[in-house]
Image: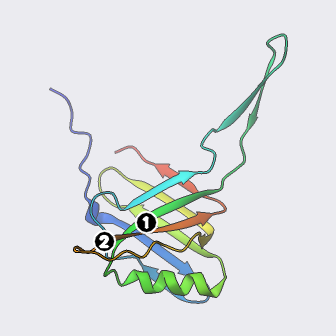
Amino acid sequence: MGALLGVYDPEKVTIDIISPVLGNHRVSGFGEGSFITAERTDPELYKAKVGAHGDTTLARNLNRTGKYSIILSQGSPSLAKFDALKEINTPFAVKVQDGSETPLISGSEKAVVMSEPTAERGAEAADVTIEIWCQDLTTVRSAV
């Protein structure tokens, strides 16, 4: 019989915004399904250069830029905070933590709201995607 690898609890995932102008804010009011994605602009850790004779040189990829996509419900109280962050034109920090048995820590010291989210209204409440560009996106997964 296989071993239990850990229990994931979405309620233990927190996203904190730390703004030197607006203060700290814990994001709330997430949409359905996946509510945060972290991805590097260029996820390759190394770049290979292969010469005509097959000689290879590896170079570390130092591009640490990336983005978070945060899915919020239409009625999320955090939407007003992200609107304010768009207007102040000052970078802020982002910290994502997963306190469950499948830990993940992610963050960026310099981030900005990347684009204006789509405004949608219809027969049902819609989700809103906030995209945050990060100068120095880091993600660490820890074993249980």
Q: Give the residue displayed 66% in from the left and 53% down from the top.
A: 64
Name the quadrant of the C terminus. Answer: top left
Secondary structure beneath dot 2 equals loop
Q: Quadrant of residue 133?
A: bottom right
- Residue 70: mark: 1
Left or right relative to 24: residue 125: left
Q: Is residue 12 above or below residue 6?
A: below
Mark with earlier residue (2, 1): 1
Rendered location of residue 55, percent (x, y): 81, 15
Inspect the image, locate mark 2, and give the three-letter code of the amino acid beneath it. Ala
Left or right: residue 49 compared with residue 127: right
Which of the pair 92/128 is nearer the observer?
128
- As drawn, 44 above or below 78: above
- Looking at the picture, which amino acid does disc 1 mark? Ile
Which residue is painted at 33% across and 50% down in the image? 102
Q: How many marks?
A: 2
Position of 100 compared to 53: left or right? Answer: left
**What residue is rendered at 62% in x and 68% in y?**
109
* Render colour scheme: rainbow
Q: Which mark is residue 126?
A: 2
Q: Position of residue 83 (x, y in %)?
A: 51, 84
Quadrant of the drawing holding the N terminus: top left
